[in-house]
Image (cartoon, helix red, strand yellow):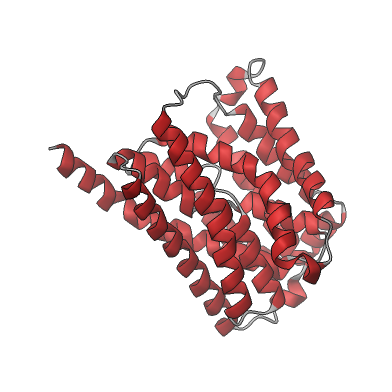
Amino acid sequence: MVWVLPLGLCGAILAALTVPELGVLLHGWGLVPGLVALIFLISGLQTRAGTLQLEPRFVRTLLSAALISLLLSPLLGWLLARYGGLGPDLALGLLVMALAPPTLSSCVVLTGAAGGKSLWALFMTLGLNLLGIFSIPLLLTLLVGDATGFSPWALLGKLLTIVLLPFLCGLLLRPMLRGWSRRGWLNLVPTLCVVLTVWMTLSHSRALLLQLSLAQLAGIGALAVLLHLTLMGVSLLAARGLRLEREEGYALLFTASQKTLPVAVSVLVGLGAPTGVAVISCILFHFGQLMLDSTLVVPLRRRLQRVAV
């Protein structure tokens, strides 16, 4: 399941470059915000509230994850975007990805695959995504507000409408649709929504996309990997400072370092500007973090098993 999204994104890029007409037409119909809202509606349907005991160590870990993911990451992202030699659109995409909260599913899946506390990863993901709705407009204003001229209140309203409200609706509908929320195919719907959103957005900005050189793509890819590795290093130090058990440290490692593509896309949608090139930065970040973290799962699990023995 982890690799379904990367493969779908490859297909979206190929379709946007070869047959963009339908994507441009659908983008003009204003379907992108609706797809983002559907992602978070399903996330709410699949969330089981009240299954976590709030032990003090979890609360401290959640606060540490918030500082790393929602404060340190944006500051590092701003430095890389400002001094990394990127064009303004690519730099905006990198910054927005740095501002985004953790991935909605892959960090939980990878935490569990590595033998970590996936329930901790789940609830840290939910908490940071809710906090991110409010932190992103504020920090974007502080870091580049004057340069972009966007309204933080308009962006906050957009995020509340297409992220928080659908998520809360999903939570409220879960008791009535419990059978639906457990169906396996439902997990593929958010992935399909992301792929369609990227396809329509890239189709709309195809002309700008074709102007990017391989050097520019390599540059944004290298900066994205650098940011992700830095966040992972800080997360490891934080886990040691908090004296977490290894399983708990894995949850912090993946949650605090990964960034969610749907929220980043929703922010770019909320900005209301042509964002096709900026989405490329987000996609490369997403690819890089998944490939890196997937290679770590087996070594981390083996290390955990050796300690247990």
Residue 9 screen position, x and y as percent: 59, 58
Towards the viewer: 197 or 119:
119
Looking at the image, residue 37 lies above or below residue 219: above
- Residue at 33 percent across and 55 percent down: it is 296
Residue 251 screen position, x and y as percent: 40, 42
Q: In this view, does 24 lie to the left or right of 70?
A: right
**Considering the image in quadrants, where does the C terminus appear?**
top left
The residue lying furthest to the left in this view is 309
Residue 151 screen position, x and y as percent: 84, 57
- All told, the count of numbered labels is 0
Residue 74 in which image quadrant: bottom right
Looking at the image, residue 206 lies above or below residue 163: below
- Residue at 54 percent across and 59 percent down: it is 73
Towards the viewer: 283 or 8:
283
Q: Is residue 27 left or right of residue 177?
A: right
Q: Can residue 2 be seen in this view?
A: no
Q: Can residue 138 be seen in this view?
A: yes
- Residue at 63 percent across and 42 percent down: it is 131
Residue 81 screen position, x and y as percent: 61, 73
Looking at the image, residue 243 lies above or below residue 167: below
